[in-house]
Structures are given as C-alpha cells and as structure tokens.
Image: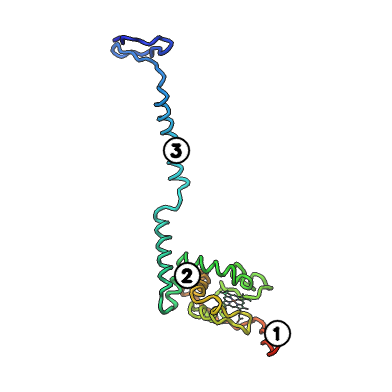
Amino acid sequence: MTPNNPPSPAEAPLRPHSFDGIQEYDKRLPNWWLLTFYGAIVFGIVCWLRTQHFAGPDDAAQLRAELARIEAAKFASVSSLDDATLWKMSRNPVVVASGRATFSTTCVGCHLASLRGKDENPQAIGVNLTDQIWIHGGRPMEINSTINTGVPAKGMPTWGPILGPKKITELVAYVLSYHQEGEPVIAAPSTAPAVPAPVAGTPK
Ligand code: HEC
C-alpha cells in the first residue's frame, strides 16, 4: 500500500524489511513523545533512589518514635514513681534523650560524658555511674533519691530543688540506660574526700 502523500526518502527513508508487502518509514519520533519517554525514565530513577536508597524513616520507625513520644508523655502523669516505672523510662528513647541533654549540661563536669567519672580520669570528682558498684544504692528509686538529695558532704550537689522531679527522673532513666534490670548491685563505701562543712560566718 502506498500513502497518498509519501514523504521524501531524505525525510523518512524506508526500513529495509517488508512484511506481506507492508513497509515502514524510518521516521524520527516526535520531540513531545521523546520528552515524555526520557522524562519517565528519569522520574523512575529518581523515585527508585528516593524510596529505596535515601528514604527517610520508614513507617515502622515513625510509628515507634511516635509511640515512644506518647509513652514519654504518659510518664509525666505517673502518680507514684517506682523501680518498674523507672526501668521502663530507661528503655524509652525520648525520656533517655531528655536525660542525656540534662546530664550533658549539669553532670558531665564531675561524672564526665562517658559517666565513668574517676574510673576514666582520676582527676574527675564524680564516681563511675556505669559500673555495678554503688555507694548509695543501685535500685532505681535509690538512684532517684541520691540525685534528689545529693551527698553534700562528699561533693555531690542536691539536685532536687534545682532540677525538679521531671528532670531528675529523666536523669535516673539516662543512668539506668547504661544498666540491665536484675544485674548485681555491689555496695561500696564512699572514697570521695569529705567536703569541709562551711564555717558559720565565712563568706561563700
Ligand atoms: C560537683 C561534682 C558533681 C556533680 C556536678 C554531680 N555529681 Fe554526682 N556525685 C559526685 C560525687 C563526688 C559523688 C560520690 C558521692 C559519695 O562518694 O558519696 C557522686 C555520686 C553520684 C551518684 C551516686 C553513685 C553511687 O555510687 O551511689 C549518682 C547517681 C550521681 N552522682 C548522679 C549525678 C547526676 C545525675 C548529676 C547531674 C544532675 C550529678 N551526679 C552531678 C559529684 C558530682
């Protein structure tokens, strides 16, 4: 079959094959078509990289983060704090992150960023909070009360009035995040030098 208005051979040469007498022109594909075609390929590659290689947190991770946030908010309304609750808080990433933030501004000076205090650097004032040796008790509620009341005679400040209960429980959770529930607690005496009691009348 020959079209009524055949293009010139320069414009569209005939392809060499012929099927049942039908031949094809070798015409250039229209630009709009090529643009859509290559565009689709580029779009496909971008989508693939975006979803398979540079994807943000997946749904499961987002859900876990959201649940941790809700759980952390619920801890705030716990009426009576106990060991079990503090252990649970120590497994909540939101609570532990808040505790880490307070620790890094308030406690690192003495206990160091590693929490290992004197064990890392003998010059440090604070004791190691990551080992199983505890001077004032290693149960979560005992750690809570040590931080609250401090050990002023040995140089550990009284944090309760300064930080308030929320920040203190977050700090307990942060310290506990270095520990396992049920691990042994070895009682040890304090080796910190006694801080001289302020003499009445001397300016601070
Ligand atoms: C000025 C230095 C100093 C700062 C700041 C400090 N601590 Fe201490 N901390 C000490 C010393 C010293 C001891 C050891 C007390 C003793 O020997 O009885 C101690 C002991 C502790 C203990 C008890 C350890 C045990 O074995 O029973 C905990 C828990 C603790 N600190 C937590 C904290 C937290 C949390 C902070 C921040 C809010 C903090 N400390 C800030 C000096 C400090």
Asked if the residues shown at circle 1 and circle 2 are in contact, with their CB atoms under 8 angstroms apart, the answer is: no
In this orientation, which residue lies closer to the viewer: 43 or 116? 43
**Could you tell me how far apart the alpha carbons at marks 2 and 3 are, in whole angstroms?**
42 Å
Residue at image mark 2: 90
The local crowd at label 2, few if under 14, some if 14 to 19, many if 20 or more residues have their Cα within 10 Å, is: many
Q: In which quarter of the view is residue 192 placed?
A: bottom right
Q: Work out whether 93 lies above or below 34.
A: below
Q: How many marks on residues?
A: 3
Which mark is first along the chain, 1 or 3?
A: 3
Instruction: Classify the position of ligand 1 by quadrant: top left, top right, bottom left or bottom right.
Output: bottom right
Residue 73 at x, y = what percent?
Answer: 42, 68
- Amino acid type indicated by mark 2: Ser
Residue 31 at x, y = what percent?
Answer: 42, 24
Residue at image mark 3: 45
Tag shown at residue 57:
none
Horizontal side of 5 relative to 179 (left or right) equals: left
- Amino acid type indicated by mark 1: Pro
Which mark is first along the chain, 3 or 2?
A: 3
Residue 27 at x, y = what percent?
Answer: 40, 17
Q: Secondary structure at mark 1?
A: loop
Residue lying at 31% horizontally and 9% vertically, measured from the top left: 4
Residue at image mark 1: 203
The local crowd at label 3, few if under 14, some if 14 to 19, many if 20 or more residues have their Cα within 10 Å, is: few
The local crowd at label 1, few if under 14, some if 14 to 19, many if 20 or more residues have their Cα within 10 Å, is: few
- Amino acid type indicated by mark 3: Ile
Q: Secondary structure at mark 3?
A: helix
Which mark is first along the chain, 2 or 1?
A: 2
